[in-house]
């Protein structure tokens, strides 16, 4: 029997189930991958926002990663909310110790409602300790500005930001375009593999039900990498997964509702 692909998420818990660890595990499951988790922080959260954050001690993250890495094994992993420089240091040390290289870094900084999920003083640790370990890093536009130190107004700026982020050691980058209000009816994600740029253009879905889009996208990417899918093909599958999840919104909650993690697989099934 061939072994099932295994993916690990190192991230924060979202009690509302739309982002964080919960979104990641749902996405892994939908893509047929065995999901595991190391929780860095517990957020008290629903579609209206984050009302509290309880970070766990850095050793808790390190021990969870060690427990799964030394027993079950990990084919690919993603990082999401890491909260502090100390947690980033502990996570980076484990990734290095295990020698994992299919590493997706989603540099989560601020929740859609404005709550901070990464302390300001931790940005430098993210840049210097985690980017060099990243196979693919997936910032949204504000995160790309913080990581690159550039103000991004045009696609040319975005390309320059991608180059700078790779100069910090990330092998590939996807700068996501969800926050680009000027893009009109389209949403454009920019992929850079260290040499060549590709633009992934999709229809912008007019909705406020986008809680957890970034988490879901990076989890789908991680699931595909765990299966051994080549990087750009994995990015395209992740893009299709999140497009379906946004398009078939569930209408839950009173604020920024979660995306529909079931949609992609149901559509795949229907087209067979
Ligand atoms: N309204 C939308 N319609 C279609 N795709 C979207 C929309 N908003 C975000 N996306 C896609 O969802 C993914 C996450 O994007 P983004 O919202 O920029 O990141 P984050 O959730 O990290 O802030 C990207 O692939 C982006 O293109
Ligand atoms: C625990 C946790 N992690 C990440 C996010 C970011 O969510 P988004 O994917 O919408 O940027 C979140 N709101 N909560």
Image (cartoon, rainbow, N blue to C red):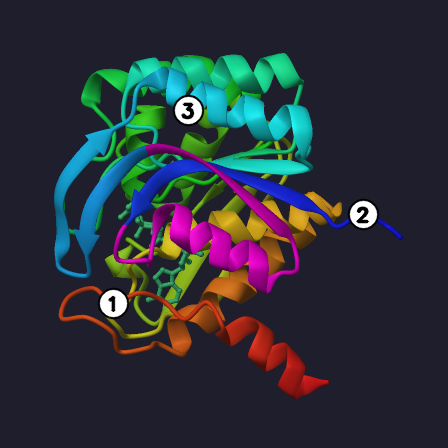
Left or right: 93 as drawn, with respect to 74: left
Q: Which residue is mark 1?
A: 257
Q: In the rendered structure, which segment of residues is drawn in magenta?
A: 15-40
Q: Where is residue 16 shown, x and y percent of the image?
A: 26, 57
Answer yes or no: do the residues labelled 1 and 2 have beta carbons within 8 Å? no
Q: Which residue is mark 3?
A: 61
Vertical side of 89 occupied by 80: above or below: below
Left or right: 200 as drawn, with respect to 118: right
Comes first in the chain, label 1 or label 3:
3
Q: Quadrant of residue 94?
A: top right
Comes first in the chain, label 1 or label 2:
2
| The magenta stretch spans residue 225 | no
Q: Which residue is mark 2?
A: 3
Circle 3 sits in a helix, a strand or a loop, which is it? Answer: helix
Q: Nearer the viewer, residue 185 or 21?
A: 21
Q: Where is residue 71 shown, x and y percent of the image?
A: 67, 29
Q: Nearer the viewer, residue 113 or 44?
A: 44
């Amino acid at each position: 029997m061939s072994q099932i692909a295994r993916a690990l998420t190192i991230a924060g818990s979202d009690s509302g189930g739309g982002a964080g660890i919960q979104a990641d595990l749902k996405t892994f499951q939908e893509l047929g991958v065995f999901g595991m988790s190391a929780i860095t922080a517990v957020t008290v959260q629903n579609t209206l926002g984050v009302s509290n954050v309880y970070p766990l001690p850095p050793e808790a993250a390190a021990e969870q990663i060690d427990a799964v890495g030394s027993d079950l094994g990990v084919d690919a992993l993603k990082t999401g909310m890491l909260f502090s420089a100390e947690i980033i240091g502990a996570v980076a040390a484990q990734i290095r110790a295990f020698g994992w290289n299919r590493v997706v870094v989603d540099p989560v900084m601020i929740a859609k409602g404005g709550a901070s999920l990464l302390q300001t003083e931790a940005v430098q640790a993210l840049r210097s300790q985690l980017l060099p370990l990243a196979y693919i890093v997936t910032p949204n536009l504000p995160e790309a500005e913080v990581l690159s130190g550039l103000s991004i107004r045009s696609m040319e700026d975005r390309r320059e930001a991608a180059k700078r982020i790779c100069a910090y050691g990330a092998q590939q980058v996807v700068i996501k375009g969800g926050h680009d209000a000027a893009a009109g009816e389209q949403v454009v994600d920019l992929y850079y593999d260290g040499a060549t740029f590709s633009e992934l253009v999709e229809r912008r879905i007019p909705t406020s039900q986008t809680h957890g889009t970034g988490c879901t996208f990076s989890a789908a990417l991680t699931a595909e990498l765990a299966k051994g899918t080549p990087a750009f093909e994995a990015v395209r599958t992740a893009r299709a997964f999140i497009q379906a999840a946004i398009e078939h919104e569930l209408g839950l909650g009173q604020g920024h509702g979660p995306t529909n993690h079931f949609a992609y697989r149901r559509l795949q099934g229907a087209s067979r």
